[in-house]
Amino acid sequence: MKKHLCQIVLVSFIGFVFLLTSCRTLDLKILSPVGSNTNLLPALETEIDVRVIEDHLSYNLTKTTSFGTEEDSEAVMLQTLSQNQPLSTTSNDFILLFERDVRNNITNPFGETKGKIVCNVAALNTDAGSYFFGLASAVTLGVLNLFGFPATNCSSSIDIEVELYNQQNELLAYYQAIGKARILSGLYYGYLTPSDLRAANIKAFKKAMNKIKKQIEADSNELLNALSKE
């Protein structure tokens, strides 16, 4: 009986170790937006406020780890950021997604630019999730995960704004949308940490941009006329 129990524990432990190493890293194909508009706008210069994005990312990385007095909280925040920033989402992800969406799905990139399109990340909220899935996985030594139970979960919610300007820098249109994404990772699916949080941010941004592309498509005739004027 004791020998049989040890075998069960050993198999369970091996399964749990396999669980920790089986999730995949981020597939770079996720950085390719999909869903092209039918009526493409003329070439537009792209702008995105990098500083604001980095501020949002810094806050989400440190909001659960800052501690101490008001005087030393900034030092703790900067230390945490320097340790974690390279491992998670960077502003480059959002810049790349926006520029690719504009170039491939919103505009015809060839020819003279007729204005500019500006993106602003108004809000970003990330959540590494509760410890329930990880705790349950650890307590059962990965047995639950053999049947598809998640080991980790994280989510992201992003609010983005897009503005279109003509060559005279006059505002032609304003759009806003919220995108949400949740990533569950288990034995047969998902991502290794921190790729799971990065994937959640990317998917949330893409969902918000898909909503904005539909709004632009609905106004495409008016925008084409406005952008064609000298």
Image (cartoon, helix red, strand yellow):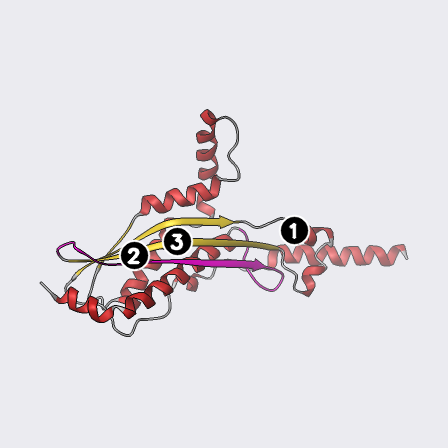
Classify mark 2: helix, strand or loop: strand
Q: Position of residue 107 (x, y in %)?
A: 24, 67
Q: Quadrant of residue 137?
A: bottom right
The amino acid type of the residue labelled 3 equals Asp
Q: Reply yes or no: does residue 174 show up in magenta.
A: yes
Circle 1 packing at 10 Å, graded few (<14), some (14-19), many (20+), is few
How far across and how far down the image is residue 26, in percent? 48, 58
Q: Residue at x 62, y 54 (%)?
A: 20
Question: Which stretch did the figure color magenta?
Answer: 168-193
Q: Residue at x 46, y 44 (%)?
A: 60
Distance between the Cα atoms at labels 1 and 3?
A: 28 Å
213 over 48 or under it: above or below: below
Q: What distance separates the C-alpha of mark 3 from that of mark 2? A: 10 Å
The amino acid type of the residue labelled 1 equals Phe
Say which of 74 and 194 sits in front: 74
The residue drawn where x is 42% and y is 49% is: 124
Q: Secondary structure at mark 1?
A: helix
Relative to 61, 20 lies left or right: right
Label 2 environment density (alpha carbons within 10 Å; few <14, some 14–19, many ≥20): many
Under circle 3, the secondary element is strand
Residue 128 location (% of width, % of height): 54, 49
Type of the residue with mark 2: Val
The answer to whether mark 1 and mark 3 are in CB contact below 8 A is no
The mark found on residue 159 in the picture is: 3
Which label is found at residue 162? 2
- Is the residue under label 2 in contact with that under label 1 (CB below 8 Å)? no
Q: Around disc 3, counting alpha carbons within 10 Å, would you say few (fewer than 14), some (14 to 19), or many (20 or more)?
A: some
Q: Relative to residue 25, is residue 211 drawn left or right?
A: left
